[in-house]
Image (tube, rainbow, N blue to C red):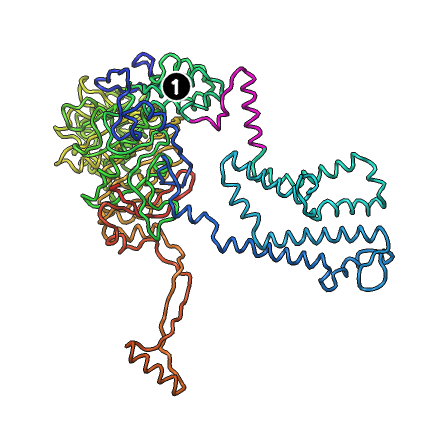
Amino acid sequence: MDSDGTRETRGTHANPVPRPAGPPAMPAMPPRPQGGPPAAERTPAAVTDWLNEPRPVTRPGIWRFGYRLPKAARAAERLSPVTVVGVLVPLAVALVLWSLWRRGSFPYQWALLRVFTPDDWWWGGTLASPKGMQGQEAKVVYDGAFFLLLVYVMGRLGSWADIVRHVVARREQPARAGLAALGALAVLSLVFPTAFPGVGWDALPVVAPLFSLVVLITGGYDVFTSAWLTDALYAAITLLVLWPFARLGGWLPLVRTWLAARGAAARDREPEPAAEQPPARWPELREAGQYEAADVLTREAAAGRMNDVDCARLSHAWTRARGDGRTAAFTEAVLRHGGAALTHPSGARDLPGRATRHDVLAGQVRIGRWAEGERTPLAYGGVGAALGPETLGTSLLVVGPSGAGKSRRVIAPVVESLALQALTGRCAVVAVSAAGTPLGPDSAFDVVVRVGDPASVHDLDPYADSDDPDEAAAFLAEALAGDLENVGAQRAATALAQLLGPYRAAHGVFPTLPVLRELLEGEPSAVAALREALTDDRHAGMRRELDARLRQRGAAGDPGPELADRLALLDRPVFAAFFGAGDDTIRPFSLRAVAHHPLRVRIDLPAQGHEEAARQITRLVLAQFAAVLRDSGRRHFACLVLDDATGAVTTESVRRIQRLRSQNAGVVLALRSMADVPDSLHGPLYGAVGCRMALSGVTTWDGSRFAAAWGTEWVETRDVAQHTVFADQPMTRAIHALRKLVTGKAVTTEAVTVRQVERERWSASELAHGVPPGHAVLSLTDVTGEHAPPLLVDLRE
């Protein structure tokens, strides 16, 4: 199976995986995580317990590990006394009505029967006095029809079906099937009381009306001399009674599970059904017949030779192997290497350290706790708040002032979680931050690019290993002129392509940034050398491109000078060994690698004094990231994390962010203020991202943007007005005066008005002044479209 370069000779891939400068040695025991699965770092059994912990599917943003409904939500699911009364009252009414019906106390009770039956069946008078067999059987059928109508009407009024589903259907198997079976037995005892020993009540009018109807249709009792017909009628009645209980209890799926277990036992295996086995016994492998591999992994986890990353990595590898039909290769690798099989290309099985809680199996990182309050739904109140690929796949925008905790409480945990996911093969992460930002040690990443640092091992390829001049020109145009209103992105890309294309045709490579700057400035020697290299007839088209660029030079609206000035910020001595201009001691890195491998990449931007160059690099990385993920055929999630997205949000970048959701990718943008984004892009940016977070301390101007993005909701308000009572009678006025003298308050009455009004979910003032320190307001949308409303999160827990 695809090992992502684990066993192939290095450098033989079309897209080789960049290796760390010093790959870590493979220990016999995987490193114990700090802050990983609870207590997994101390006892071997803890990994097994961590695997077996339930992870129910819940709403977006809820920490799934060991999730239990809050007490308030469980109390809301209980049947209230009003609901119980609403069930019992129709039942009592039905019993009274049926008793009156049996006694014939209804006026004109038999009139409808006399209308639809022949007159010669009855004696004269208003009562239904049957003359013979037909009238007697017709009365039985009539009683049965009234009984069915009564049960249906009262069942609808009392919502009996909904109550039964609430009590039975939400339980797990086999308790659900057992409760349904008890209900079926109770109803059968009412329909066939003689079949149950010790039962002395009368049968419900179900069997007798059906048999009477058969008598009326056939014209006599001779039909019941056939035993098979009688048995068939009894069987039909029994099946009709059992059918709703079978659907309610899920009997058919349960029987299928039991039959599957018996089939496994017939193959000299006696495993539990996969649905009943704990996850630590790897039921997915056993269900597919891979018992040896499952036993090996079970022993490895029980002995403490596997950690949470190993479990998540092998679970993901099994899913891919099964989908590709390569289960044999997976089994062979597990039998040979055990828990160390199919490791990440770097050889790492865990991060050097962890600063927060992660559930690698569910792909979540816990960032805090949902605060309890009136705004918070019951399912969220007081439970953990988490982020994962399913929510980051719609992109996340984080806005908060300096010191609010963007990097420490949001960005760093997200990067750490994505790095762990990369070790399982499910994710690739690119983190861009200023030098010195604590996003993790160098050993936690496969590639670390320190732009402007002479000690950097890797260099950033400004062209992302592209061989298309137009694509490479689009990268540079976005980086150099994406934030310039007077230079259009299309004009800038065209001007750059008119130089990149001819240069690549002449030399086989794209020019370094210093050479490109000379060409943009129209340096005579550089232009003459390029023209001379294009003298061959096969370069006639490229000569026309170069001539077109030279004709535009110096004309009004020529983007060349602006691009050259911007490029001069990257053509500084501190960057002399970067962007493809260095020697062989520095390894070039292309972002195109993240589209093919689950890499962990960190890019450190230049230190102070090069802020504008750092913004250009950020725009360049964002443009390359969005382009290289297009049509790559990858199956792992890719995420770009920008610790400071100031200057990175442009018209083109917003369009690229909108397309990432369909490409199994996302970005995390952190901003100090929305003032760092052009006003015309505020609305499009909020619309492009699915997750939005406003930290404590945002301004009212920023809060108004969030309030507009989150919209309004309907709420119920109660207005209480007090009106003074004016008495007309002298005695009443005297009593009111005495009461006012004693209490000091006038006699008033209260008028309560309840109405539905539309209000903002969070107002700008609440976001600016009502969010406590260390908290944030977060709204989430996952890749399936399910969303969580904006709720208060305590980031300190």
Residue at the far front in the pictured view:
198
Residue 721 image point, x, y percent: 36, 71
Residue 454 image point, x, y percent: 14, 24
**Residue at 81% over, 45% down:** 215
Q: Amino acid at mark 1?
A: Leu
Left or right placement of residue 351 versus residue 629 in this view: left
Residue 723 image point, x, y percent: 36, 75
**For residue 36, what is the image quadrant?**
top left
User: Residue 267 magenta-drawn?
Assistant: yes
Reply above or below: 638 against 658.
Answer: above
**Front-lying residue, 770 or 569:** 770
Left or right placement of residue 76 versus residue 154 in this view: left
**Front-lying residue, 31 or 105:** 105
Reply above or below: 611 against 634.
Answer: below
Crowdedness near tag 1: few (<14), some (14–19) or many (≥20) residues, C-alpha within 10 Å: many
**Residue at 80% over, 59% down:** 128
User: Residue 473 magenta-drawn?
Assistant: no
List the residue tagged with mark 1: 297
**Front-lying residue, 33 or 572:** 33
Q: Is residue 96 visible?
A: yes
Q: Is residue 659 visible?
A: no
Reply above or below: 450 against 783.
Answer: above
Left or right placement of residue 257 versus residue 105 in this view: left
Quadrant where the C terminus lies?
A: top left
Quadrant where the N terminus lies?
A: top left
Q: Give the magenta range.
A: 252-278
Residue at the far bottom in the pictured view:
730
Residue 432 image point, x, y percent: 23, 33
SS for dot 1: helix
Reply above or below: 633 against 710.
Answer: above
**For residue 318, what is the image quadrant?**
top left
